[in-house]
């Protein structure tokens, strides 16, 4: 990549800029969206997962408590219908302890709250600031006829709850109350068996924020009331999530569970944000790395393709610069796909037209110079012509005075002949130098002053030279494939073409064929008129001189050497060009006259 | 110039952060859908409320224990009207400011009065009525016997919707001239229970399992399996074709309601009454009335209630409140299992009523 190729403002620089923007902007936008989406999705998943976890733990807790309650209720119902037999009551209590392992103590009270069987009535929760402790049976709610699960009570640091179940007989009559103390150690076992994420903790608190169980091996004592997550969990209707102080928490109020209905227990799952969102962080890092790599690859590919795309254009620009500088590049034309190829072709076509115009302009300039030379020559010829006329006149007078055989007669005849020849040369010079005559009538109807209709002029020329061609047994064919008018006086064109046809005819020794054509030049700005013959031709080395004045290949004394010079002068005066080349099939010569079309 | 400087100085001395408004702690027994509307309504009014739900079935016990303990005491509680005498007797609630004692419908205010004094703001009125679809002939009179007669005429297999519950048993009990009181049970109560249990399996479908009564009734009503449904306003919110529902009175039906009380242990009693006033305002009570067909308690609001609510109100006008005694809500703890035992065939009405009598005796003596 050259300095010119990446210069600020260059086409390649701009293409690279566009490609870079096209790659960077979507990459950044997509990357940011992907990162944001990933974080959002991960946050959702973390919260969903945590909620699912605590729902499962809550359901396990509820299931165990419900099983315990149903079993105790069934036992209470059996006891109520069994009419209070002491032995069967003891048996029932033993069986209940066996069937419900979490039952730590069991007391059976009569409807008045007196102990009938089992353990002494346990002490209820001691609430701070609640005043003197009530009687045990009141404290645990045995006075109530409703089922009951209270807040957690810590018995020597071990969390337990009291469950009160009515013992109603067949008729629905209250026969007594079963008060069971349930060991909540199973909650800890359930939590401990759960597979928690890195750094995650689970905590179960009762309605006053006292921890019932925790995933920590040691349950730290003391109420968690005041912890924002605990407060939020206990105040919530069902469940929710919150992020606070670098922790992601999910909580569920367990009061909606059947076993804990009306008791505001809560289960809380918390995990450090750094651990919870580790996947999001990894996704972010991967997205950035992959995005950067993709961006680099896109930019590299973009640079590669930009170079490939702009190289023909740069070549084309250089070619255009060369053309603008007036040079015709030697390099082959630029090749390229699609529009670039079309553009290259158009530039080359344009260059060709510019060359033609330059050639025409050059010819015009040459014509001007020749015109100046002609004017000067005409003046010289005019000045010479008068004394030469005198010389010729006196030579002829002297000849008339000299009889045949006089010794001076040969000299005088030589003087007269040479003077005559000089006059002829001067006549040709004057003709060469003569300016176009716009006033001359144009050929053909609808003619425009200073313009010719090639078909008409070519036809007229054919008619003029027909007798001369017949003498030398030459044929003339014309072919006109253009209807455009050309910017040259008809007489001038006629003179040029007659001259060229006569030259061809004079070159034949045993007859020949002459072809005269007029067709549009490439680009449509000029018309090409050719006069070709199948004669002996002109040597290549002589071709560069045939348009020079006084150069002739004819026998001495038979040509003035001004015919083709006059032709070139006339064509150049019209802004055209005349060239000589090989004739068709490499035989003879072909004169190629290019005249600008009339606008 | 001095005043702004003084204000700036005070602000600077007062710390960088403004004190957060302390939320009003509200303990309620709304259903989940009512809770949702409550939260929305309160949020729109810019009140900062920390609300907690207590299931209605456990509400009486939990609330009384909470207020007795005095910890985490709410500023306002929504209670059933039958719980109020017990809370008043235990001096667990306080009277509202005098300016909140006016404007109530008479039957609403009665619910909030104990011993001649107003102790609560009535939030809604409820009770048992007979609901039927327009086109179903109304019972000849509100009497239970005419309801049974009308149900017999129906061609539906089990046209009567009645729940196996002591509250539903009250009209049958009162029809025999007995009210819900510990000392009043006699042979008339046995007869009432026998009549009540007799409707099940024939006029009324066999009762579903405990806890699924409400959804079962709703399903049967929506399936047009019920011609006459003894129910209360709490069920109307979930009904289809609410504009085609006709409501008629049931003689001796219990009438009650929901009240808003401020506990004696409330940290912000004035804020509690402010929230209570807002919840019972005409605007809010009509929002709840439109959504759940609850019967508003302000006399001014009743006129703007929907036609269905007004029909409900008219039917409840002849209903009779339950005895205003502290023991009244506890009576159902014995009555409900006894009624269920008889309907299930586990006990005779005589056995069941005798058991209820013994239970109530224990209750009264304790």
Image (cartoon, coloured by chain):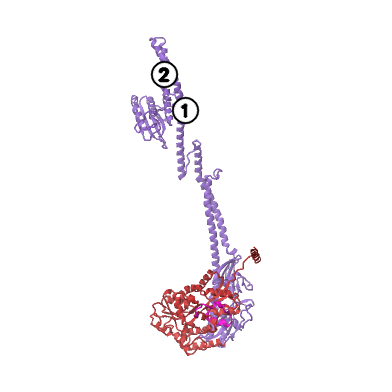
Chain colours: A purple, B red
* Chain to which mark 1 belongs: A
Task: Estimate the spatial distance between the alpha carbons at disc 1 and disc 2, rounded to whole Å.
Answer: 27 Å
Place of residue A258 in the rendered image (x, y in percent of width and height, measured from the top left): 53, 76
Q: Which SS class for mark 2? A: helix
Q: Is residue A549 above or below residue B234?
A: above
Q: Is residue A55 above or below residue A283?
A: below
Q: Where is residue A430, by image quadrant?
A: top left
The quadrant of the picture occupied by the N terminus of chain A is: top right
Residue sitting at x 52%, y 70%: B40
Place of residue B261 in the rendered image (x, y in percent of width and height, measured from the top left): 55, 78
Residue interval drawn in magenta? B78-106
Say which mark, if any, is on residue A421.
Answer: 2
Tag 1 residue: A369
Q: Where is residue B143, by image quadrant?
A: bottom left
The quadrant of the picture occupied by the C terminus of chain A is: top left
Q: Is residue B99 magenta?
A: yes
């Amino acid at each position: 990549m050259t300095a010119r190729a990446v210069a600020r403002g260059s086409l390649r620089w701009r293409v690279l800029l566009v490609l870079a923007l096209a790659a960077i902007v979507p990459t950044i936008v997509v990357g940011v969206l992907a990162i944001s989406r990933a974080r959002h999705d991960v946050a959702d998943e973390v919260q969903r997962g945590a909620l699912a976890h605590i729902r499962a733990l809550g359901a396990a807790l509820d299931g165990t408590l419900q099983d315990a309650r149903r079993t105790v209720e069934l036992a209470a119902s059996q006891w109520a219908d069994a009419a209070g037999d002491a032995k069967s009551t003891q048996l029932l209590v033993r069986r209940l302890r066996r069937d419900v392992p979490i039952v730590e103590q069991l007391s059976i009270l009569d409807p008045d709250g007196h102990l009938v069987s089992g353990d002494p009535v346990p002490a209820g929760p001691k609430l701070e600031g609640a005043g003197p402790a009530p009687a045990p049976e009141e404290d645990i709610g045995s006075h109530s006829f409703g089922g009951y699960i209270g807040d957690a009570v810590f018995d020597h640091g071990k969390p337990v709850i009291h469950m009160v179940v009515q013992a109603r007989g067949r008729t629905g009559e209250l026969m007594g109350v079963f008060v069971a103390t349930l060991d909540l150690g199973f909650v800890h076992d359930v939590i401990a068996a759960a597979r928690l994420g890195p750094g995650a903790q689970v905590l179960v608190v009762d309605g006053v924020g006292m921890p019932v169980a925790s995933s920590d091996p040691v349950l730290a004592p003391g109420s968690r009331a005041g912890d924002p997550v605990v407060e939020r969990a206990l105040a919530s209707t069902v469940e929710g999530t919150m992020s606070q102080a670098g922790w992601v928490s999910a909580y569920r109020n367990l009061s909606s569970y059947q076993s804990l209905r009306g008791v505001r227990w809560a289960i809380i799952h918390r995990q450090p944000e750094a651990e919870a969102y580790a996947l999001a962080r990894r996704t972010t890092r991967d997205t950035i790395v992959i995005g950067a790599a993709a961006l680099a690859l896109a930019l590299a590919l973009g640079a590669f393709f930009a170079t490939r795309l702009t190289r023909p254009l740069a070549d084309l620009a250089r070619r255009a610069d060369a053309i603008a500088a007036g040079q015709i590049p030697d390099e082959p034309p630029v090749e390229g796909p699609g529009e670039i190829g079309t553009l290259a072709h158009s530039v080359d076509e344009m260059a060709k037209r510019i060359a033609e115009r330059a050639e025409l302009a050059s010819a015009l300039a040459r014509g001007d110079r020749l015109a100046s030379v002609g004017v000067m020559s005409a003046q010289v010829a005019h000045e010479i012509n008068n004394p030469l006329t005198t010389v010729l006149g006196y030579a002829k007078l002297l000849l008339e005075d000299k009889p045949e055989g006089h010794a001076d007669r040969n000299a005088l005849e030589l003087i007269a002949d040479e003077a005559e020849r000089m006059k002829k040369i001067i006549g040709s010079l004057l003709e060469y130098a003569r300016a176009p005559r716009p006033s001359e009538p144009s050929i053909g109807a609808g003619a425009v002053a200073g313009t010719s209709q090639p078909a008409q002029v070519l036809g007229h020329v054919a008619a003029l030279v027909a007798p001369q061609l017949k003498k030398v047994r030459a044929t003339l064919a014309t072919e006109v494939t253009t209807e455009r008018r050309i910017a040259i006086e008809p007489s001038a064109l006629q003179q040029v073409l007659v001259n060229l046809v006569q030259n061809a005819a004079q070159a034949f020794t045993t007859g020949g064929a002459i072809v005269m054509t007029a067709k549009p030049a490439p680009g449509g700005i000029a018309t090409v008129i050719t006069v070709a013959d199948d004669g002996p031709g002109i040597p290549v080395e002589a071709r560069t001189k045939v348009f020079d004045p006084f150069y002739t290949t004819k026998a001495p004394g038979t040509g003035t050497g001004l015919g083709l010079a006059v032709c070139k002068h006339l064509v150049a005066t019209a802004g055209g060009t005349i060239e000589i080349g090989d004739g068709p099939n490499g035989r003879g010569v072909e004169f190629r006259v290019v005249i600008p079309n009339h606008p | 110039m001095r005043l702004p400087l003084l204000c700036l100085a005070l602000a600077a001395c007062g710390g960088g952060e403004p004190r957060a408004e302390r939320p009003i702690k509200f303990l309620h027994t709304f259903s989940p859908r009512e809770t949702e509307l409550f939260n929305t309504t309160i949020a729109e009014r810019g009140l900062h409320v920390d609300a907690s739900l207590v299931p209605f079935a456990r509400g009486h016990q939990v609330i009384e224990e909470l207020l007795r303990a005095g910890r985490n005491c709410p500023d306002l509680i929504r209670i059933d009207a039958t719980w109020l005498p017990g809370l008043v007797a235990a001096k667990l609630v306080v009277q509202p400011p005098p300016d909140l004692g006016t404007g109530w419908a008479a039957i609403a205010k009665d619910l909030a009065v104990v011993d001649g004094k107003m102790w609560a703001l009535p939030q809604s009125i409820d009770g048992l009525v007979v609901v039927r679809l327009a086109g179903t002939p109304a019972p000849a009179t509100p009497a239970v016997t005419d309801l049974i007669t009308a149900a017999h005429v129906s061609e539906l297999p089990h046209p009567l919707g009645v729940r196996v519950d002591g509250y539903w048993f009250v009209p049958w009990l009162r029809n025999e001239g007995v009210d819900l009181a510990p000392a009043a049970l006699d042979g008339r109560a046995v007869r009432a229970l026998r009549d009540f249990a007799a409707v099940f399996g024939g006029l009324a479908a066999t009762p579903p399992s405990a806890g699924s009564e409400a959804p079962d009734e709703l399903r049967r009503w929506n399936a047009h399996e019920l011609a006459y449904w003894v129910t209360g306003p709490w069920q109307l919110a979930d009904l289809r074709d609410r504009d085609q529902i006709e409501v008629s009175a049931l003689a001796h039906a219990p009438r009650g309601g929901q009240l808003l009380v401020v506990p004696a242990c409330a940290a912000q009693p004035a804020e509690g009454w402010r929230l209570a006033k807002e919840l019972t305002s005409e605007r809010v009570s009509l929002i709840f009335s439109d959504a759940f067909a609850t019967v508003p308690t302000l006399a001014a609001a009743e006129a703007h209630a929907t036609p269905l609510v007004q029909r409900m109100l008219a039917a409840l006008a002849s209903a009779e409140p339950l005895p205003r005694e502290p023991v009244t809500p506890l009576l159902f703890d014995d009555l409900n299992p006894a009624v269920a035992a008889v309907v299930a065939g586990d006990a005779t009405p005589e056995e069941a009523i005798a058991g209820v009598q013994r239970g109530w005796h224990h209750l009264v003596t304790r």
